[in-house]
Image (cartoon, rainbow, N blue to C red):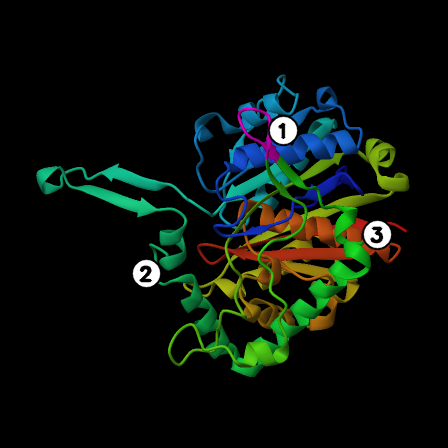
Amino acid sequence: MRFERCHIPVGAAWSSPFARWQGPLAPFSSLDVAVAVTARAMRERAIEPGDLSCFVLGMTIPQMGSFYAAPTVASRIGAPHLGGPTIAQACATSVAALCAAAATVESDGGLALTVLTDRTSNGPHVVYPGVGGAGGRVDREDLPLDSFAADPLTGEAMIATAEAVAAEGGFPREALDEVAALRYEQYGRALADDRAFQRRYMVAVELEDARGRPAVSVDADVGVRATTHDDLRALRPSRPGGVVTGGTQTHPADGTAGLLVTTAERAKELGRDGAVARLVSSGTARTEPARMPKAPAPAARAALDAAGLGPGDLDLVTTHNPFAVNDLWLERELGIAQERINPFGSSLVYGHPQAPTGARAIVELIEALALRGGGTGLFTGCAAGDTGAAVVVRVDG
């Protein structure tokens, strides 16, 4: 899909810190986290809720009140005039929600907000009626843990897809460790100078209890461990005889993110120093069964084809890479060197809350392009069901 009118004001796209699974955000609904962070982000950027013309919520893990999620969040951030959909497409939710918001701008203009939020901690335990089962037997599902453990189409766990792609690509354990070590090194750049890069877009989570007393304050990622080549080499494979370790796969997390989409003129008014990121195109793809880490490559090609571009036209790339093998396959298929991918780290390092993961990577891509004075960037990532999604953005210097 190619976009002609859609722009993201630089600075009007944000992410909370990501907190590790069962960390400080575990006791709180992801909807509450989304409201707190979105309201704060809009206040800090002087964005009036009443000016919004479209609201799209992306989330993949049900919370209490999810049936009313989008209109509830819109009302709580001060936009009770807005309805809007709640979108879930596993780890591709950010791209799907962003494209839904962009579609309204493409057709009608206006100011669209998409908010992405999820809590992998304390996921719901779902009980389904076992229709036809003897003795009133019921079926159970633990979200999201059962989803990680097996794709119902293939019966394979997500880690099995990484092992399969590593084997088909001929990627040894050392290659995965090398990519992971690079991503941790790149993440270190985001922490330099008192986290100067992250402070360009990161909005703290500040929540109160029912009596209005401070309940939690999270202003930086929680759960990232300093990791070196030696640390990675010392880890055992997650599966006997495998090449994937705890250091070359991501960890589940909690967090939220948001992006504004509008016309070029309005984006210049709202952007930091008038800076604007144009949303150029998007693409999706599906690869063969149980080969999820391959999917970002054809999704990237679809987005690039829609933009009329090739890999050589890209200045920077960010990815959702739950496994290091994802980025190795992307390099093999598109010829993009690892040093050009994820210049300030990635979800491999800081964790994966699902819906907001891609949004944070897109925000980091925009900010990285703005820092270098402009350029063309690609975000691409995989999602459950051996699918992938990608977007191309352009920041003019």
Residue where numbered disc 3 is placed? 370
Residue where numbered disc 2 is placed? 155
Query: Residues under labels 3 and 1: Cα distance?
Result: 26 Å
Pick the front one: 323 or 5: 323
Asked whether the residues under the numbered discs 2 and 1 touch, taking CB atoms below 8 Å apart as contact, a structural biologist would say no
- The type of residue carrying mark 3 is Ala
Q: Dot 2, crowdedness within 10 Å: few (<14), some or many (≥20)?
A: few
Q: Is residue 277 above or below residue 40?
A: below
Considering every residue shown, the one lying at the far top of the view is 81
Q: Closer to the N terminus: mark 3 or mark 1?
A: 1
> Residue, x 75% and y 46% (percent of image)?
201
Identify the secondary structure beneath mark 1: strand
Identify the secondary structure beneath mark 3: helix
Q: Closer to the N terminus: mark 2 or mark 1?
A: 1
Query: Residues under labels 3 and 2: Cα distance?
Result: 43 Å
Residue 58: give x, y in percent of width and height: 55, 38
Residue 209: give x, y in percent of width and height: 55, 29
- The type of residue carrying mark 2 is Gly
Examine the rendering and report whether any part of residue 279 can be seen: yes
Task: Tell me the number on the disc at residue 55.
Answer: 1
Residue 357: give x, y in percent of width and height: 59, 50
- Please state the extent of the stretch shown in magenta in the rendering: 207-214
In the image, taking residue 340 as reference, residue 183 lies left or right, namely left
The quadrant in which residue 100 appears is top right
